[in-house]
Amino acid sequence: MAYDFDLFVIGAGPGGIATARRAAQYGVKVAVAEFDRLGGTSVNRGCIPKKLMVYASRFASHVQEAAGYGWTFEPGKFDWATMIEAVNHEVTRLNGIYQSMIDQAEVALYQGHARLADFHTIDVAGQTVTAEKILIAVGGTPSKPNIPGIDLAITSDQIFSLPQQPKRMVILGGGYIGCEFACVLNALGTEVTQIIRRDNILRGFDQDIRTEVQDAMIRHGIRIVQDELVSLEKHDQGLRVNLKNNTMVLTDVVGLAALGRKPRLDHLGLENTRVEVENGAIVVDAHNQTAESNIYAVGDCTNRIKLTPVAINEGCTFADTHYGGERRVMSRDNIPSAVFTTPEVATVGLTETQAMEKYGEAAIKVYRTRFRPIYYTLPQLEEKTLMKLIVHVQTDKILGAHMVGDSAAEIIQGVAIAVKMGATKAGFDATVGIHPSSAEEFLTLR
């Protein structure tokens, strides 16, 4: 049977665009459908605009720290509208770059909602096309709990379009999105209360990391409350947040719901195929193939790791395998990640708990250090950096590396290469450090 396209990609986020471009490089006929702006969550409502806001939030502390080095500055003034405009201008510029990428790769772009009519047929805004293979890369969307008044809260997607900075903000959830925005808004001058259901933020991260970051956030002025949201309602002083333990918090008219994300599968037409969905996510195998032999899925819509670089790698692996003559399987071991809180978090490999569960407590050795970086000595600030290595005793291999502190993401990115290549503690010990730097402390742990 002749198809309109060799490959049809549903979703033009990082994973979808990477797949389409790589496949097109191999000479296949490719199309991509997107109902929203190009670039997906990462470019439009996630990684990029959030990181720009993180940068903006840190200038006030830089001014305070500069005083310890002899600098004097006039009191500064932050303008929320200027920042939001600049951030959104950069997002628009990146949208244009993604458009250029598609054009240069000669990938056909269909603008509109794509729906699967069957396992080879796609309906895009009333237009029907066929494809030999289909790849789903629709990403995710913020979750909201089903409680009274939840529509009064905004999601993390909407914070980038707030016309005014809230004086008070309640953030619901202790995941990385909630923690990042709590730190950003707090540093910009908003009074932040973060509601978490457990005793620590950042579930799934190493316990030492969780404790270190939470203590720092509280020290920086964020109020963290362990409780459970019951309802939201309008109040003459703004918005009333009612909690389970018969307490309430008053905040501005704006509240931020940051309770995770779910795959964006609504109206996708999966019921017209044999694609399986489990716990709200598309089920795929090691090759990102669904239960329908010609339909694949990558990124946040699957039951895999939900990170932008993972989606990109999955997409490129798919294209290389099916169109480049290179049979590849993506390894999901030792994938690094970062949380752009203040202080910053970065990690690769197993947590201490995971290592003990896998190998036994006696089979691992933990090295850790906590110190004040030299940068903070003259300003006389008690900002700390925490570094931690988890080592397998028998093989001396590093099972996990974790850090809280300035430039954690940049440092762990380098460490991750070593861990991925099977680095040992002896290898770290034999490496000469760069002095003076925080990163060298990973090489001196005893």
Image: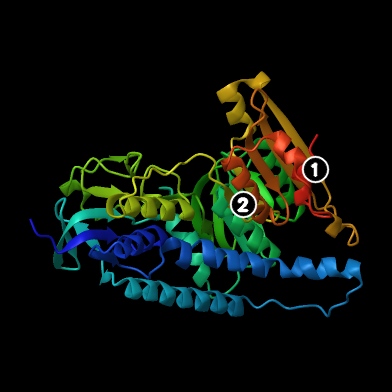
The residue beneath circle 1 is 370
Residue at image position (57%, 49%) is 337
Within 10 Å of disc 1 (Cα), the crowding (few <14, some 14-19, many 20+) is some
Q: Considering the numbered disc 1 on the image, is that residue within a helix, a strand or a loop?
A: strand
Query: Among all residues in the image, which is located at the extreme front?
Result: 325
Q: Quadrant of the N terminus?
A: bottom left
Q: Considering the numbered disc 2 on the image, is that residue within a helix, a strand or a loop?
A: helix
- Report if the CB atoms under discs 2 and 1 are less than 8 Å apart: no
Res 246 seen here: no
Q: Position of residue 29 (x, y in %)?
A: 22, 65
Res 140 seen here: yes
Q: Is 156 or 347 nearer to us in this picture?
A: 347
Residue type beneath disc 1: Arg
The residue beneath circle 2 is 413
Q: Is 367 or 318 nearer to us in this picture?
A: 318
Q: Position of residue 232 (x, y in %)?
A: 50, 54
Q: Position of residue 224 (x, y in %)?
A: 66, 48
Residue at image position (43%, 52%) is 313
Residue at image position (26%, 64%) is 27
Q: Quadrant of the C terminus?
A: top right
